[in-house]
Image (cartoon, rainbow, N blue to C red):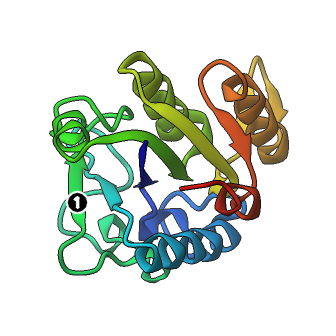
Amino acid sequence: MKTALLVIDVQNDYFPGGRMELHGSVEAGEKIGDLMRIFRKRSLPVVHVQHVSVRPGAAFFLPGTSGVEFHDSVKPLAGEKIFVKNYPNSFRDTGLDAYLKENGVSRLVVAGMMTHLCVDTTVRAAFDLGYGCIVAGDCCATRALKINGAEVTAGNVQNSFLAALNGIFAKVMTKDEAMQLNL
C-alpha cells in the first residue's frame, strides 16, 4: 500500500494578517512542515493542493494576491505535484485522482485547512473513490462558525468535524501517531 501526504490549502490568507485567519493555523502549519520533512526523508509523495477562488464576490484566495500563495511553513519542493482547485473538494475538476492512481497511491495522510470545509469534503470524496485516509487532526485548522445567532467555537468546530470523519471516512490521529504507522 503506497501512501502519499496530501496538503490542502495551507495558504497565506489563513495565517495572521491574512484575509481569513484560522484558529491554530500557525501551529498546524508547523506540524504539517514536520510531516512533509518525514515524507520527503522516506521518499514518499507529497502532494500540494492550492485553492484559487474564482467565484464572484470571493473575499480570499484571490488570484494574483500574496494570500493565495503557499505559506512558508509548507513551500513545495521542485518536483512535488501541485494541484490548483476552485472548489472545496480537492478531486473536483483536478487531476488528483488520476495522478494518485497512476502513481499507485491507495492511502492518504491528509493535513490542511479548513477542517470543516476543504479537508472534510476532500476526505469524504477520497473515501468514495476508494482511498484509505488518515487525517492528522493536529495538522488541521479551522474557524468559529455561526448558526441561528449562536457561535460555535473553532475548537468545537474542529472536534466535531474530526469526530464525524473518524471511523468510516478516515482514521483521525495526531501527527506523531501517523508517523508511527508503517508508511
**Quarter of the image where the N terminus is located:** top left
Residue at x 69%, y 61% (from the top left corner): 175
36 and 71: which is toward the camera: 36
Residue at x 62%, y 44% (from the top left corner): 135
Q: Position of residue 39 (x, y in %)?
A: 47, 69
Q: Position of residue 69 (x, y in %)?
A: 31, 71
Amino acid carrying label 1: it is Ile
Q: Secondary structure at mark 1?
A: strand
155 and 75: which is toward the camera: 75
Q: Position of residue 134 (x, y in %)?
A: 60, 42
Residue at x 26%, y 42% (from the top left corner): 104
Quadrant assignment, res 141: bottom right
Residue 95 appears left or right of 18: left
Q: Position of residue 19 (x, y in %)?
A: 48, 62
Residue 12 appears left or right of 29: left
In this rendering, the answer to whether 45 lies above or below 121 is below
Residue at x 36%, y 69% (from the top left corner): 67
Write down the residue under mark 1: 82
